[in-house]
Amino acid sequence: MTFAPRTFVVGEVVSAAIMNQEIRDQFNSMFAAWTAYTPTWTSSSTNPVLGNGTLTGRHMKIGRTCLCHINLTTGSTTTYGTGNYSFSLPFTSANTGSTIIGNAQLLGTDRWAGHMLIGNSASTTSPFFSSSSTNPRLGWMSPTLPETLAAGAQVRMTFLYETAA
């Protein structure tokens, strides 16, 4: 709910209603429940199909700062497509000249720790994981990186970024 505060003018009489809107309501919105959204799961080549899996997202936006969480759980009818994965953001990122990093986890056959990357003016984010258990270099998540995905695999992504508006 947070929005740009109003500009008061000299001599203006500030009412309780204005104070409630400008101070109380904005302050309360920072403690409100997160907002649910449905991310889109895409790939750089053939898109995956969620099937009977689940993909949920939620976010809290305060001003132009967005804290976001995406959770993917694959199902028995999920197909994984080909290429590198991306997930849609609730808001386009700012063009700040830097890449934002968040956390990602893959709970599959093994548990993998990774990173989230969000570029300038982006509408998607991508998880990156180690290339293998013996190679700590990061690679773009795909159907086979860091491991071959199967039903029940879960990807959890949490990140903070600056929005464009």
Image (cartoon, helix red, strand yellow):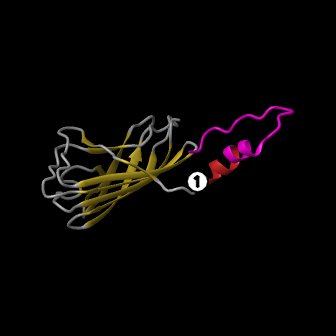
What kind of secondary structure does the magenta stretch mostly adopt?
loop
Position in image of residue 123 (x %, y %):
39, 37
Q: Is residue 57 magenta?
A: no
Q: Any magenta on residue 20?
A: yes
* Magenta stretch in the rendered image: 1-21
Q: Say what secondary structure mark 1 lies in.
A: loop
Q: Is residue 52 visible from the viewing direction of this image?
A: yes
Question: Which one is nearer the viewer's eye here, 24 or 61?
Answer: 24
Q: Residue at x 16, y 60 (%)?
A: 151
Q: Residue 161 location, x and y as percent?
A: 49, 46
Is 97 placed left or right of 142 in the picture? right
Can the viewer see residue 130? no
Q: Is residue 16 left or right of residue 4?
A: right
Quadrant of residue 157 within the rendered picture: bottom left
Q: Which residue is mark 1?
A: 30
Answer with the quarter of the image where residue 152 lies.
bottom left
For badge 1, the amino acid type reads Met
